Image (cartoon, rainbow, N blue to C red):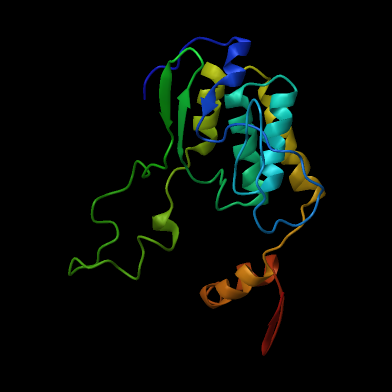
């Protein structure tokens, strides 16, 4: 990872943070569906969920820069679309400032310190019960929050608490969902984890599952 530039002036507001940067028009609180073109004159935030993009847009409107918007958007995605903005995982941020300086933050997950090269293998050298993808041994050490914090520390301009709060609000107040069809397609993969499926998505009976 290169050292982040020290520039923290308002000119950063026009910078491009490829991780999440800049502004769509805020939409009413409805479930997400389809794609709508969104023109912008000065900046644009784009993400996999419109509510998270709206969070980043609001940060820019309040004087935040592109990194501030990227951080707030990523944290909001952890609520609105967890597999796209997961704080339990990792990622990258590529930054290019208005001054021409660029840097990259690599905060992908890492293996635990106690991990070994043979921890997934049985006595014959084959992977044991898909343990490299499922179960406790498959879990990496998350890097998302640490990476976002590092980017904010070097390049952000708004208080960290201000960037986290929108995600907290979304989590506490709830969001509309439009995932029924996708959830229905995933049920065959979830039946092996009935406790998680039942507690999160559906009421289960002896012969049925309801979403």
On the rendered structure, is 3 left or right of 120? Answer: right
- Front-lying residue, 74 or 49: 49
Q: Is residue 22 above or below residue 91?
A: above
What is the tally of numbered marks visible in this picture? 0
- Front-lying residue, 2 or 94: 94
- Front-lying residue, 91 or 18: 18
Which residue reaches farthest left? 124
On the rendered structure, is 164 left or right of 113? Answer: right
Residue 104's spot in the image, x, y percent? 41, 27
Residue 79's spot in the image, x, y percent? 67, 48
- Residue at 67 percent of width and 19 percent of height: 158
Q: In this view, does 145 lie above or below 86?
A: above
Name which quarter of the figure residue 61 lies in: top right
- Front-lying residue, 58 or 192: 58
Residue 211's spot in the image, x, y percent? 72, 74
- Residue at 24 percent of width and 51 percent of height: 117
């Amino acid at each position: 990872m290169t050292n982040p530039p020290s520039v923290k002036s308002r000119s950063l507001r026009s910078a491009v943070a490829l991780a999440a940067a800049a502004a769509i028009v805020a939409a009413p609180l409805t479930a997400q569906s389809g794609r709508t073109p969104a023109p912008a004159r000065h900046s644009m935030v784009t993400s996999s969920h419109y509510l998270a993009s709206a969070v980043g847009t609001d940060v820019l409107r309040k004087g935040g820069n592109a990194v501030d918007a990227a951080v707030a958007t990523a944290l909001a995605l952890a609520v609105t679309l967890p597999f796209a903005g997961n704080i339990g995982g990792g990622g990258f941020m590529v930054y290019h400032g208005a001054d021409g300086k660029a840097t990259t933050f690599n905060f992908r997950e890492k293996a635990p310190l106690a991990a070994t090269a043979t921890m997934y293998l049985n006595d014959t050298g084959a992977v044991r019960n898909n343990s490299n993808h499922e179960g406790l041994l498959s879990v990496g050490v998350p890097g998302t929050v640490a990476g976002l914090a590092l980017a904010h520390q070097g390049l952000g301009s708004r208080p960290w608490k201000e960037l986290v709060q929108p995600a907290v609000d979304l989590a506490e107040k709830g969001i509309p969902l439009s995932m029924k069809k996708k959830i229905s397609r995933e049920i065959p993969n979830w039946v092996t984890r009935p406790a998680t499926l039942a507690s999160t998505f559906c009421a289960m009976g002896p012969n049925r599952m309801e979403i």
